[in-house]
Amino acid sequence: MPTTRTRVAIVGAGPAGLLLSHLLAASGIESIVIDKRSRDEIESTIRAGILEQETVRVLTESGASDRVTTVGSRHDGVELRFDGQGHRIDFPSLTGRAVWLYPQHEVLKDLIAARLAGGQDIRFETSALRAEGIDSDRPIVTATTADGEELRIEADFVVGADGSRSVVREAVTGASRVGGYFREYPFAWFGILCEAPPSAHELIYSNSPDGFALISQRSPSVQRMYFQCDPDADPNALSDAQIWETLQARVPGTTLLEGPIFQRDVLRFRSFVAHELRRGRAALVGDAAHTVPPTGAKGMNLAVADVVLLERALRALLLENDERLIDGYAEKALKRIWKAQHFSWWMTSMLHVTADASDFDRLRQLGELRSVVESEAGQTYLAEAYTGWLHEA
Ligand code: PHB
């Protein structure tokens, strides 16, 4: 079996894996990134689009993406809509921060271009089979290439940035592939992309008696919108007219500007945190380590925060033989992860309507929403969590 040597074997060419290889390269640490998907698939998969200010800082300061600030757009607030009224949460006045709307697949295009320009070895269509020997200082990743050949990557450290179905996680958490804390939700999002002008300049998170809706944007001519649906819903079962009718009913008080729908999908979600984030010479980052419901827009931001911590720890370990930061990686990362889990769960439970909700549940939920928007402290908590907690210096 052909064996390749590198310092860090990174499984997964999503935002976490690519950003990690980028930051490591800047410190002179060489890596190989493998991903089972093709480049085209990675660059065209539609994901969320909100970047925290710290995420934008990391991407721009490291030279990973300039387009985030030129093509992306700064958002200074969001609207919470309930009981027929909108309430704007103003981020800069509450926190001094803002967020940026820039779709994840655009971040990926920027990262792949920057990595390839920097001579990074990225193997697309190469599926990791397993990580082994992580308790030694010569861990190995075994993979299958596009041609069906086996490949062995010998490294000083292995990183699982391979998403919610992580292969590396199995080695890190021990016994089972799942090995983590879970929470399921009884709903999903029906998402659309449409050709229309924006219906609002900022995102609208709406709680209506019929369920949740989110009005987001992509560009002056393309919009992204979602509404709460059954996890088993068939994305093709509704006509365009039914989709617009559902969306309109869920943002009472706002007139949506309609246009041709050119993509639809049903997004199931859950909360997950792996029992272990690191063992020996392997660690997990991004969705391999945790998954959050999309309501708090934390997914990619958490991945970037993990990577910033791990890169620092790997620099100390591989350049100075100092194990202190890698020994503290999981504990440090988990503090932010659980705060983000709470925020994502909270936004989800506050804004969605469960099928079995009683009148009490419904009225309590409105009381909760009022507690947020009518209090500066409540608004500030939402704004701080949404714009993201600062990274440590
Ligand atoms: C999106 O634009 O796709 C989006 C924005 C905010 C979220 C989730 C998704 O909370």
Image (spheres, grey):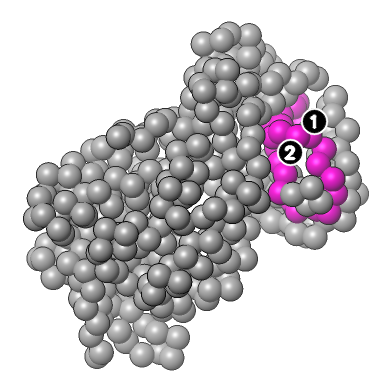
Amino acid of disc 2: Ile
Marks 1,2: beta carbons within 8 A: yes
Q: Is residue 266 left or right of residue 331?
A: right
Q: Is residue 40 left or right of residue 112?
A: right
- Of helix, strand and loop, which one carries label 1? loop
Q: Where is residue 197? Give x, y as percent.
A: 84, 45
User: Which residue in the structure is indicated by mark 2?
Assistant: 215
- What range is drawn magenta here? 192-218
- The residue at the point 59 percent across, 53 percent down is 67
- The residue at the point 85 percent across, 49 percent down is 196
Q: Where is residue 298? Give x, y as percent.
A: 50, 40
Q: Where is residue 64? Give x, y as percent.
A: 46, 56
Q: Is residue 254 left or right of residue 149?
A: right
Amino acid of disc 1: Val
Does 47 lie within the magenta span? no
What is the distance, in whole Å, between disc 1 and disc 2 at their CAs?
A: 9 Å
Viewport quadrant of the C terminus:
top left
Residue 351 visible in the snapshot: no
User: Which residue in the structure is indicated by mark 1?
Assistant: 251
- The answer to whether residue 371 is above or below residue 211 is above
- Residue 338: image quadrant is top left
- The residue at the point 34 percent across, 56 percent down is 23
Disc sitting over residue 292 in the figure: none
